[in-house]
Image (cartoon, rainbow, N blue to C red):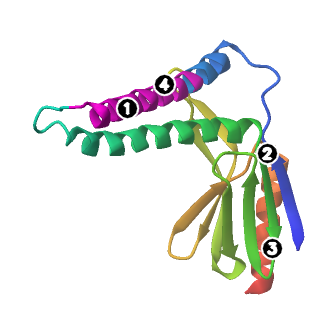
Amino acid sequence: MEILATNRGHKPKSQDIWDRLNDGYTLFLVFVLLGCTVMFIVLIWRCLTVPNPAPGVRWIWIILVPVLFLFLDMGLFILDNYLRSRRAVETVWIHNETLVIECHNCIFRRRKEIPLSSIQSVEPISESIGGVYYRADRPERLRITYSHRRHYRFGLCMTDADRDALAKKIMELNSLIR
C-alpha cells in the first residue's frame, strides 16, 4: 500500500463577506430541509393517529413518506458537502494495482476503487460551486477519466503544485501498469 496523497478540508482563514454569506446560505438550506422533515413527521403522525379520519385521508401518508425521505436526504447531502469542505480527510493510495480514494469525517463516507489499467486521463478541473449568492471557481480538484468515459472528481483543498504532482504520479503509475 503506497499512499500518494492525504488531503484535508479546512476552513479558509481569510473569509470575506461573500464566503460567509455562502456558508450561511448553505446552513440555512440545511435547517429549512430538516425543518420540513420535522413538519412532515408531525403530519404523518397526525394522519395516523386521528381517531375517525374522513374517508380518503389515509392516502396522504403515502405521499408524505417519500417527500419526507427526499427532504431528509437533501438536507443530509448539503450538510455532507459542507462538512466535506471543512473537516474531511481524503486519502489517495495504491493497493493491488488499484487506485483507492477514500474520504473520512463526513456524513456519507466515500470510497472509490479504480483499476490503474482503466485510467485514461487525470486532469485538473475548475468548476463553479457555491450557493445562489456566490459562485466560486475551485481549481483544486482533479477529474479521473476511466473505462468508457466514466469520471470521478476528487481532491480537497490542494494547491496547484500538489494537484499537478498527484496527477503526474497517477499517470506514471498507469503507464507502468500498461
Could you say where residue 116 lies in the image, as x and y percent from the top left? 71, 78
Alpha carbon separation for disc pair 1 and 3: 52 Å
Query: Any magenta on residue 129?
Result: no
Q: Nearer the viewer, mark 1 or mark 3?
A: 1
| Label 1 sits on residue | 40
User: Which residue type carries mark 1?
Assistant: Phe
| Extreme-top residue of the structure | 17
Q: Earlier in the sequence, mark 4 or mark 3?
A: 4
Query: Marks 2 and 3: in contact by CB < 8 Å?
Result: no
| Label 2 sits on residue | 158
Q: Earlier in the sequence, mark 1 or mark 3?
A: 1
User: Which residue type carries mark 4?
Assistant: Val
Alpha carbon separation for disc pair 1 and 4: 26 Å
Corner quadrant of residue 136? top right
Alpha carbon separation for disc pair 3 and 2: 20 Å
Residue 17, compared with residue 149, is above or below; it is above
Could you say where residue 67 lies in the image, as x and y percent from the top left? 35, 40
Identify the disc placed on residue 172.
Answer: 3
Give the residue displayed 81% in from the left and 58% down from the top.
Answer: 91
Alpha carbon separation for disc pair 4 and 2: 24 Å
Quarter of the N terminus within the rendering: bottom right
Q: Earlier in the sequence, mark 1 or mark 2?
A: 1
Residue 147, compared with residue 37, is above or below; it is below
| Label 4 sits on residue | 132
Give the residue displayed 23% in from the left and 38% down from the top.
Answer: 60
Task: Give the magenta part as a residue range.
Answer: 27-51
